Amino acid sequence: MTRTTCPYCGVGCGIAAQADGRALTLQGDPAHPANAGRLCSKGGALASTVGLEGRLLHPMIGDRRAAWRDATALVARRFRETIARHGPDSVAFYVSGQLLTEDYYAANKLMKGFIGSANIDTNSRLCMASAVVAHKLAFGADLVPGCYEDLDLADLVVFSGHNAAWTHPVLFRRMEAARQRGQRHVVVDPRRTDTAEGADLHLALKPQTDVRLWNGLLADLLRRGAVDRAYVAAHVAGFAEVEAGLAGDDQSVHAVARDCGLDPAELETFFRLFADTPKTVTLFSMGANQSAQGVAKGLAILNAHLATGRIGKPGACPFSITGQPNAMGGREVGGLATTLAAHMDFDPASRARLQRFWGAPVMAEAPGLKAVEMFEAVRAGRIRALWVMATNPAVSLPEAGKVREALAACPFVVVSEVMAETDTAAFAHVRLPALAWGEKDGTVTNSERRISRQRPLMAAPGEARADWRIVADVAEAMGYGEAFAWRSPAQVFREYARLTAYENQGRFLNLSPLAALTPDAYDALEPVQWPVTPAGGTARLFADGRFQTPDGRAHMHALEAHGPAEATDPAYPLSLNTGRIRDQWHTMTRTGLAPELCRHAPEPFVEIHPDDAAPLAITDGRLTRVQTRAGEAVVTARLTDRQRRGSIFLPMHWAAAYAPAGQANPLVAARTDPRSGQPEFKHTPARVRPY
Ligand code: SF4
């Protein structure tokens, strides 16, 4: 059996698998701390997805099969020419939380240190960029304080916009087990999801009123004397400003309940539970992050935990859960356009440090374009060469129709991919075949900062190559061979681990004990949480009350509650919310291959409350047109009182290949949080009509 890691969600479950050719047997790895042998439906169906049907097996220039040497030379030449003619910011990489850390590191190094632009952004921008900014503002760096053990130890878990039962099922099962000993669950979510269905309390708040709710909680904690004044005095800055800011609104339970559309008695119950339960974990995920006020929502949650000292302690922390398998690894090595590698920023000292470490000819001077901005720049002709790695933006970005226009207009598009035909690959001038899960070799970091190995089980098919190697080959063809002369993922990983401690001691993200791993030790690396010390990993951060800010204190931030970026109106009276379903992943390029996963929801649908459907003569199962100012879809109606009146839900997975009329993202307005650049996938004014 080979021990590896699931390629889907940020839980990062360990898998023990054996391959006979392409036939795979697998089970959960009982020795992996994230899952202790458990797997969900998606991880359990991996064996159905590793066939070669539809794989991209050879480099392609247009529709013609090409030699690697020719394809690489063409990519290098077109990028060099574009940079020479239009400058380094005329090119961009759009990468993915599906990449391994080594892949991400290589791509980031090429763009930020050798091309000299920061125009590399990741689809993780869509997933947790708001939490990253909130962490940086509150803690001084993008640091997740807690660990999964806290979910076992907590007496109260608050799920803020997080349907863990579907999106992080193995973690949810851990918490279900903790309920047997009395753990309580509160769900803050406009929808009655499976997580909410069995919870002790479900607060089905009005969309985009989260900041009002969390501000109200803080005001209530003050009224009850439940703020930990000693902790705040010793470790927190900004408390007085936050307290003063709360005075601007009526913070009575009745006023907050009215504004959030909640029952005052239920809100009072939540406030009391929170105040009375020192061991509280608040999980927040895409329901909070995917908002034009996603950063404020994250900060509001962090404020409540800092005010009560519930951080860095067993069973007590705010906990941002990542969607993707390696969103965290990408954040570590600078996969976001807004940071450099190893959690460094674009300040002169960090840029100079990184330039010295890399021996880089030219460093990016300032943050680059975030995902939505990047494709707007492609559409406007400011970006003229684009390399998309392991992701499908023609389906997954908001206003996806405009993204397709951008790709069609771009003079040079490269796609490195596992699959031969995706909605995005259809626009590629060059397609480069990449290794898939089960063939790749490297590391990923899960939501609790735990680095685990993905190990190869099967031989590389056709001419497919590791993403880090494809990047290194292009870098070499661009004339940067010496800095990209790695021969194995272990060499890439060691370089990254060295960087985390290079002139950089004292930072939380420190992997220095792993910087000298032999190839055998890299192969045998056991799951470990950073920061890594000579004694091993670190479960919790901030246990000593010290943060990474210049003054060592956590910073609370006063937050103003306001409505969504675009309110509903008589023409578009419903709030469209998009999201995932239990058994599919991203744009279905992998999970769509598994019949057992497709049975759960074989076609796209829209969920509507019966009271909203009745006046429009929309009945259960009827084909229904969903329209926004950005676009329209035609899907089957599902009438359910799990949906809040006035809001509808559309799953985001279906690509043109599966359901051309049923795609969600052409409908989502490309509005973003001004600080994080994360799109507001959870609210677009919409209307429905019978088809
Ligand atoms: Fe994979 Fe996530 Fe399921 Fe675990 S919970 S098996 S990581 S999809």
Image (tube, rainbow, N blue to C red):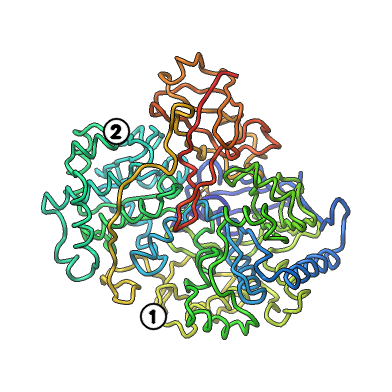
- Give the tally of numbered discs: 2
The image quarter containing residue 530 is: bottom left
Q: Name the one closer to the observer, 208 or 100.
A: 208
Secondary structure at numbered mark 1: loop
Q: Is residue 338 above or below residue 572?
A: below
Mark-to-mark CA distance, 1 and 2: 46 Å
The percent position of residue 398, horizontal first and vertical second, equals 57, 44
Q: Name the one closer to the observer, 515 or 567.
A: 567
Name the quadrant of the N terminus. Answer: bottom right
Mark closer to the observer (1, 2): 2
| Left/right of residue 615 with respect to residue 235 in the rendered view | right
Q: Is residue 223 above or below residue 626?
A: below
Q: Which residue in the protein does label 2 denote?
A: 261
Q: Amino acid at mark 1?
A: Gly
Q: Name the one closer to the observer, 17 or 309.
A: 309
Mark 2, Cα crowd under 10 Å, few <14 / some 14-19 / many 20+, is: some
Q: Name the one closer to the observer, 284 or 116.
A: 116
Q: Amino acid at mark 2?
A: Gly
Q: Which numbered disc, 1 or 2, marks the residue that appears first in the sequence? A: 2
Q: Is residue 51 above or below residue 95?
A: above
The percent position of residue 179, horizontal first and vertical second, equals 29, 42
Secondary structure at numbered mark 2: loop
Q: Which residue in the protein does label 1 denote?
A: 506
